[in-house]
Image: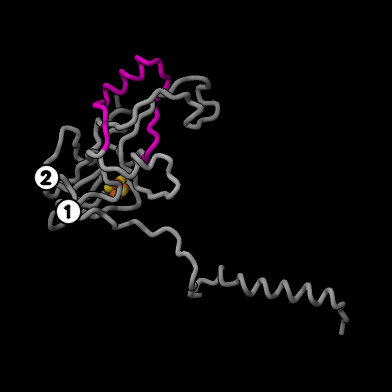
């Protein structure tokens, strides 16, 4: 049998001990106790009964959703796949079920409108030194704990000051301010998909 030195034995023992300790991290069936569970899954956490009494000027029927039995609707825009009963508000706070129809409440009412350098987006070597007409609405389909724009991303459309800027106005604003591009930014743009697509079509 090969003899090993005391130093080598201690070195190997320490390595084995550490690998046993951390095996738990890779073992799919282990039950972890006392370990932070990480971010909660927000899918399905819709705002029950939180839709407004009636639609407002900046409401627009959703583009990508499914009508189900009993006036349920399911949004198909993002993986949250919000399933809304009449009167419910979506996870992203931007969409509601009004009597079996899915509506976006952020069509043409961005809460942030700025002219930014394109490098702030950040885009590398895309029209360098040009300006981007940057817009965002309230609402987001994420709950990032370190969000720097939480005041708008975690707000409902009626909770913040907004600008009236329908798709044609966005184009005019970009041209008037000498912007070479339009950026959908600050919050998650998929939550105002209808507004974004109609602006793109112009
Ligand atoms: S975009 Fe909004 S309403 Fe649609 S599935 Fe995602 S979180 Fe739900």
Q: Left of 145 or right of it: where is 171?
A: left
Q: Is residue 140 visible?
A: yes
- Name the residue at 23% across, 40% down: 104
Residue 123, compared with residue 98, is above or below; it is: above
> Does the segment drawn in magenta span residue 179?
yes
**Position of residue 129 in the picture relative to residue 169 (left or right):** right
Q: Position of residue 106 (x, y in %)?
A: 25, 36
Task: Look at the picture and state if 75 lies above or below 183.
Answer: below
**Label 2 neighbour load within 10 Å: few <14, some 14-19, many 20+:** few
Q: Is residue 187 left or right of residue 73?
A: right
What element does badge 2 sit on?
Answer: loop
- The secondary element bearing badge 1 is classed as loop
Q: Which mark is residue 53?
A: 2
Q: Residue at x 39, y 36 (%)?
A: 186
Structural distance between the alpha carbons of marks 2 and 1: 10 Å
What's drawn in magenta, residue-wise? 160-188
Q: Mark 1 sits on what residue? A: 49
User: Which quadrant, please, contains the C terminus?
Assistant: top left
Residue toward you, 101 or 134: 134
- Of the pair 69 and 143, the residue shown nearer to us: 143
């Amino acid at each position: 049998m090969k003899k090993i030195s005391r130093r080598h034995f201690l070195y190997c023992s320490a390595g084995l001990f550490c690998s046993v300790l951390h095996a738990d991290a890779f073992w799919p069936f282990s039950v972890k106790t006392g370990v932070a569970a990480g971010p909660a899954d927000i899918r399905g956490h819709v705002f029950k009964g939180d839709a407004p009494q009636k639609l407002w000027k900046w409401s627009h029927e959703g583009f990508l959703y499914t009508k189900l039995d009993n006036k349920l609707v399911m949004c198909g825009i993002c993986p949250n796949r919000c399933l809304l009963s009449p009167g419910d508000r979506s996870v992203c706070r931007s969409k509601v079920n009004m009597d079996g129809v899915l509506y976006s409440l952020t069509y043409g009412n961005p809460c942030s409108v700025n002219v930014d350098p394109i490098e702030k987006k950040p885009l590398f070597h895309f029209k360098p030194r040009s300006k981007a007409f940057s817009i965002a609405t309230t609402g987001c389909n994420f709950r990032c704990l370190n969000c720097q724009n939480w005041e708008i991303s975690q707000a409902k459309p009626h909770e913040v000051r907004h600008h009236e800027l329908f798709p044609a106005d966005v184009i005019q604003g970009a041209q008037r301010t000498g912007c070479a591009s339009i950026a959908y930014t600050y919050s998650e743009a998929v939550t105002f998909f209808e507004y974004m697509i109609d602006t793109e079509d112009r």
